[in-house]
Amino acid sequence: MPGPVAAYVVACQERTGSNLLCGALSAQGGLGAPDEWLGRSRLHQRLVDSGTAAPSSTPGAPRPGDLDAYVDAMAARTAPGAVFGAKVHWYQLAAALDDGWLDDVRGAVPRAARSDAVVVRLRRRDRVAQAVSMLRAQATGTYVAPADGSAVDEVRHPEPYWATGGGDPLEEIERVVGTIDAHDARWSQHLAALDVPVLEVDYEWLTADYDATVRDVLAFLDHPLPATAAVPEPRTARQADARSAELIEAYRRSRRS
Ligand SMILES: Nc1ncnc2c1ncn2[C@@H]1O[C@H](COP(=O)(O)OS(=O)(=O)O)[C@@H](OP(=O)(O)O)[C@H]1O
Ligand SMILES: OC[C@H]1O[C@H](O[C@H]2O[C@H](CO)[C@@H](O)[C@H](O)[C@H]2O)[C@H](O)[C@@H](O)[C@@H]1O
C-alpha cells in the first residue's frame, strides 16, 4: 500500500508548458517550488553555493560530490512540511545518467522520500509547435513571459541547445522535432522500468482547460483543491506569436508538398 505522496517529479521536455504547470503547483503552498534542480546552466553554481560540488565540477560539466546532500540542500529551501518537487527535462536527466551520478529520476528527490515519490509526465502532442517554440525562445532569448507583464532578462546560452541558429528554419524544425521524439521515447523507456505512479498530462489539456487539469494534478499529488477554492491564476502567459504561426504553417506546407 503506497503511503502519501512524499515527493514528485515533473518529467518533461522544454516548451511543454512546464512553467505554467509548475507555477500553479508552487502557488498551491504545500507543494514546494518545482524548479529545474538539475538544470545545466545553474547546476554548478548551486552545487558550489550548497557546498556539495565535486572538486572536478565546472560550469560546463557540473558534478555533485554527494548528490543526496545536494538534493537535501535544495529540499531545505522549500517550506517546512511541503512536499518536495523537481522539474526535470530529459536532457538534464540524460546528462546525469551519462555522468553516472544518478541511477534513475528518483535520484532528483530526497532519499527519504523516494519510495513515496510520484511522477507527473508532461508532454506536448503538437511537436511542430513545440519545436517552433524552442527555436523562438532560443532566437529571442525569452523563455518565459510572466503573466503580470513584468520584464525578464534575456537568456543567451553560450552554445545553442537546439539549433544552430542559421540555415533553413524548416530543416531546423525537422531536426528539433526529431530530438523531441527521441527524448520522449527515452522518457517512456525510463519510466516504464520504474515502479512509480505516473500521471500523464498534455500541454494541450493544460491550455484548453487549465482549471480542470491543475485540479487533476493537485489531486494526484494528494493536495486536492476544494471545489469552492479557485485554481491559482496562471503565472505565465502564452508566448507564441505571428512568427511562430508562420513557421508552423510553412513547415506543415512543406511536408504536404
Ligand atoms: N498561460 C499560458 N497559456 C498558454 N500557453 C502558455 C501559458 N504559459 C506558458 N505557455 C506556453 O508554454 C510554452 C513554454 O513551455 P515551458 O514552460 O515548458 O518552457 S521551458 O521550460 O522554459 O523550456 C510556451 O509555448 P509557445 O507559446 O508555443 O511558445 C509558452 O507560451
Ligand atoms: O533551453 C535550455 C533552457 O533554457 C531555459 O532556461 C534558461 O532560462 C531560464 C529563465 O527563463 C533560466 O532560469 C535558466 O538558467 C536558463 O538556462 C529554459 O527555461 C529551460 O527549461 C531550458 O532547459
Image (cartoon, grey):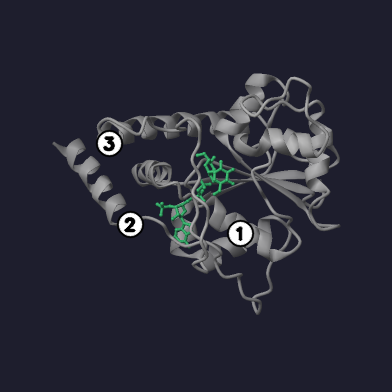
- Say which of 37 and 25 sits in front: 37
Would you say the beta carbon of the disc 2 residue lies within 8 angstroms of ligand 1? Answer: no
Q: Is residue 235 something one can see in this rendering? A: yes
Relative placement, left or right, of 215 versus 108 is left
Name the residue tied to disc 2.
Answer: 241
Would you say the beta carbon of the disc 1 residue lies within 8 angstroms of ligand 1? Answer: no
Q: Identify the secondary structure beneath mark 1.
A: helix
Point 35% across, 44% down: residue: 132
Q: Amino acid at mark 1?
A: Gly
Any mark on residue 169, and which? 3
Point 38% across, 43% down: residue: 139
Whether residues under marks 1 and 3 lie with C-beta atoms below 8 angstroms apart, the answer is no
- Say which of 251 and 188 sits in front: 251
Q: Quadrant of the C terminus?
A: top left
Any mark on residue 236, and which? none
Query: Looking at the image, how many numbered discs can be counted on the residues?
Result: 3
Any mark on residue 23, and which? 1
Residue 45 image offset from top left, x and y in percent: 71, 36
Q: Which numbered disc, 2 or 1, marks the residue that appears first in the sequence?
A: 1
* Label 2: how many Cα within 10 Å (few below 14, some 14–19, many 20+): few
Point 28% across, 56% down: residue: 242
Q: Amino acid at mark 3?
A: Pro
Q: Identify the secondary structure beneath mark 2.
A: loop
Residue 8 image offset from top left, x and y in percent: 71, 47
Q: Which numbered disc, 1 or 3, marks the residue that appears first in the sequence?
A: 1
